[in-house]
Image (cartoon, grey):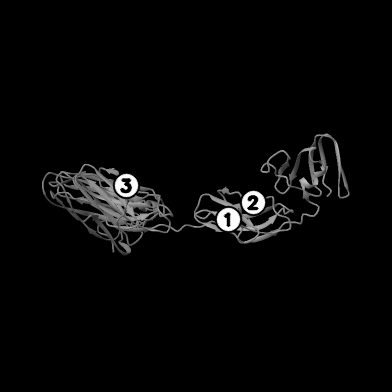
């Protein structure tokens, strides 16, 4: 069946036909009836008050363009302007939009049209095709506002089946301040976007809007106040929520002496994701040193993680390595010293983020101290003649030192290890024998290897 308003398709259908590379058929197509409505369908406005009407399209088939004319009572209201809505732009497509011709004497708006200009693009979700901004006059009454010559087209330039609904506006009723609470979006562990809509300023030139929120309907918290001079949506983004928690919130509007609230709504913040850490085998084990190894495989919900190791002679541990802060996954290690020879140690990796987690318990055993002797015992024969001893700890890649005149907390060299070299400073030439090895030193610095 051919559409009997082929002439009204010209503004849109011609453009769509060019994009599609197909001829204009004018046939009414589609598997359902697309609704075209003015919203809100009824409203009350003050004398000389501003108000808006949206042209809402709820498609039942893929749509690529639309057009309409509008009639209204010019004795009661006038049209200020026509703006493009988001309907055709939903999928990021480019669009063509003609705001039409406003005649406030005749009470008409003619030739409002829009189409998607991106080849192959269509929309199927409900949206606002156009917004009309009105101004009421100083005369009270009810104005009927009607759509006509409405055509909604598909990508081939064919009209789809439609139903059309108009609206009515009562002018002269005292305006009522009104705000609605909308569903929260962009939920995270510690924040969300709260959404509201100031639908009527209640005759005020400006209105203060905000949100009340909390874990009960007593709320207790309020977002920063925003000042609005026209009806529109508004948002707030509190970021101090607790993870995995239900929060109540509602929109609030204050204008003049009136305060109104939107309905109470709830949101649930996301759950925290814990970090993940594993314990790896110890390396570089000597009679009194070892290197503990771990791997942080996930930071969870946190931007940085504190990692360390717990260790000790039992699974109760008792000691903790120096805490390290990391901002990326990967391996980490801790060098231990002053361990007891011939001893089994338990250890596990630890990670602190949104919560504290541990790797598995593992063990290592220090080597026997055979041939390794306390430095003070080994050098006792030349006590009073040696000034300082330096040694290099290969597992930790650090220099260690002992001086008989320094306090214990300064000295880090405790044992002489077989096969390791040391620098020794003596105040005079001296010789001593340990087991079967003779050690001869000259005044000043001497490099020697400990033979046991």
Label at residue 350: 1
Which quarter of the picture shows residue 31? bottom left
The local crowd at label 3, few if under 14, some if 14 to 19, many if 20 or more residues have their Cα within 10 Å, is many
Which quarter of the picture shows residue 126? bottom left
Q: Is residue 25 visible?
A: no
Q: Quadrant of the N terminus?
A: bottom left
The residue that label 3 is drawn on is 97
Q: Is residue 440 left or right of residue 231?
A: right
- Residue mark closest to the camera, 3 vs 2: 2
Q: Nearer the viewer, residue 61 or 285?
A: 285
- Chain-order first, disc 3 or disc 2: 3
Q: Is residue 264 left or right of residue 192?
A: left
* Label 2: which secondary element: strand
The local crowd at label 2, few if under 14, some if 14 to 19, many if 20 or more residues have their Cα within 10 Å, is some
Which quarter of the picture shows residue 35? bottom left
What residue is drawn where x is 57% and y is 50%? Answer: 328
Q: Residue 97 location, x and y as percent?
A: 32, 47
Q: Residue 207 location, x and y as percent?
A: 24, 44
The local crowd at label 1, few if under 14, some if 14 to 19, many if 20 or more residues have their Cα within 10 Å, is many
Q: Nearer the viewer, residue 316 or 216?
A: 316
Q: Could you give the CA–CA distance between mark 3 and mark 2, rounded to whole angstroms?
A: 63 Å
What residue is drawn where x is 69% and y is 50%? Answer: 338
The residue that label 2 is drawn on is 333
* Label 1: which secondary element: strand
Label at residue 57: none
């Amino acid at each position: 069946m051919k559409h009997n308003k082929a002439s009204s398709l010209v503004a849109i259908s011609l453009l769509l036909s060019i994009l599609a590379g197909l001829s204009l058929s004018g046939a009414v197509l589609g598997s359902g009836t697309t609704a075209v409505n003015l919203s809100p369908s009824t409203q009350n406005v003050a004398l000389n008050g501003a108000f808006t009407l949206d042209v809402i399209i709820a498609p039942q088939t893929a749509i690529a363009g639309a057009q309409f004319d509008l009639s209204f009572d010019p004795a009661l209201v006038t049209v200020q302007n026509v703006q493009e809505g988001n309907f055709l732009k939903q999928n990021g497509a480019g669009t063509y939009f003609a705001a039409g011709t406003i005649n406030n004497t005749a009470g008409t708006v003619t030739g409002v049209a829009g189409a998607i200009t991106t080849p192959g693009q269509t929309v199927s979700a409900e949206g606002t095709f156009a917004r009309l901004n009105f101004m009421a006059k100083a005369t009270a009454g009810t104005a009927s506002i009607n759509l006509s010559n409405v055509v909604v087209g598909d990508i081939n330039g064919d009209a789809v089946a439609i139903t059309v609904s108009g609206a009515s506006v009562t002018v002269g009723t005292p305006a009522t301040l009104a705000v609605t609470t909308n569903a929260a979006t962009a939920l995270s562990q510690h924040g969300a976007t709260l959404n509201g809509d100031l639908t009527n300023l209640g005759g005020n030139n400006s209105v203060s809007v905000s949100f009340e929120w909390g874990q009960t309907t007593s709320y207790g918290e309020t977002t920063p106040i925003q000042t609005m001079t026209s009806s529109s949506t508004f948002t707030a983004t509190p970021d101090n929520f607790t993870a995995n928690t239900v929060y109540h919130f509602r929109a609030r509007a204050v204008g003049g002496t009136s305060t109104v609230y939107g309905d109470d709504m709830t949101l649930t913040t996301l759950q925290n994701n814990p970090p993940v850490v594993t314990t790896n085998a110890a390396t570089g084990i000597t009679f009194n040193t070892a290197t503990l190894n771990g791997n942080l495989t996930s930071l969870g919900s946190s931007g940085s993680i504190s990692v360390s190791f717990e260790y000790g002679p039992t699974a109760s541990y008792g000691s903790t390595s120096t805490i390290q802060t990391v901002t990326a996954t990967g391996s980490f290690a801790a060098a231990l010293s002053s361990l007891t020879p011939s001893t089994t140690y338990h250890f596990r990796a630890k990670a602190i983020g949104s919560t504290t987690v541990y790797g598995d318990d593992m063990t290592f055993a220090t080597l026997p101290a055979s041939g390794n002797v306390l430095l003070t015992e080994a050098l006792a024969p030349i006590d009073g003649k040696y000034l300082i001893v330096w040694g290099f700890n290969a597992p930790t890649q650090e220099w260690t030192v002992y001086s008989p005149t320094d306090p214990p907390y300064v000295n880090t060299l405790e044992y002489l290890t077989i096969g390791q070299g040391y620098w020794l400073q003596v105040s005079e030439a001296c010789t001593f024998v340990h087991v079967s090895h003779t050690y001869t030193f000259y005044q000043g610095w001497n490099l020697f290897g400990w033979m046991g």
